[in-house]
Image: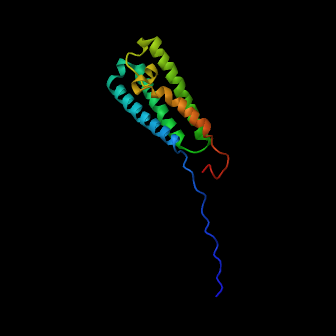
Amino acid sequence: MPTESLPAPVNPPARRPRIAGVGRVLVVIYAILALGAFGRSLVQIIQQFDQAPLAYTLSAVSAFVYIVATVALVARGAVWYRVAWITISFEMVGVLVVGTLSVVAPELFAHASVWSYYGVGYLFIPLVLPVLGMIWLSRKRPTTNPESAQ
């Protein structure tokens, strides 16, 4: 009895996760910072906004930046890659400007914000994280291959 050869099963190409390894750790840290900054700013704004509006507004801005950066790092595509660069660059500038102002003009910050004193209240993670994010983004440019962009 002749045996018909069956066609070999076609396996779809393996999908690489958008983030893995160090990228996954980076996203987790951004997510934790987003939650922490959001919670802190919410409580500060609700309870004490009149005492330090600049500091508490900056905490809310930093929370927004961390949330957008987290989403942008996870999402696929060239647009999200650009959004990640923009938010992380903004974060870096924010940490440097607010950190420097809090050192040279501490009267502006009667109460601390997330970025005050370069993120000392968050173990300087706000100062180091955008540098690591920029390094990771520079190594993980989106591909132009339509199959891998899915």
User: In which quadrant will I find the N terminus?
Assistant: bottom right
Q: Which of the 4 image quadrants contains residue 103?
A: top left
Residue at the image position 39 percent from the left and 24 percent from the top: 121
**Which residue is at the front of the view, 22 or 93?**
22
Residue 81 pos. (x, y %): 59, 39
Q: How many marks?
A: 0
Residue at the image position 47 percent from the left and 32 percent from the top: 64
The figure's colour scheme reads rainbow
24 vs 36: above or below: below
Q: Which residue, as the protein is rendered here, is positioned at the far bottom?
A: 1
Residue 52 pos. (x, y %): 38, 18
Q: Is residue 61 left or right of residue 139?
A: left
**Which residue is at the front of the view, 20 or 93?**
20
Residue 141 pos. (x, y %): 63, 40
Q: Is residue 123 left or right of residue 145?
A: left
**Which residue is at the front of the view, 110 or 121?**
121
126 vs 1: above or below: above
147 vs 112: above or below: below
Residue at the image position 47 percent from the left and 27 percent from the top: 126
Residue at the image position 38 percent from the left and 15 percent from the top: 110
Q: Which of the 4 image quadrants contains residue 56?
A: top left
Q: Is residue 144 left or right of residue 57?
A: right
Q: Which residue, as the protein is rendered here, is positioned at the far left?
A: 47
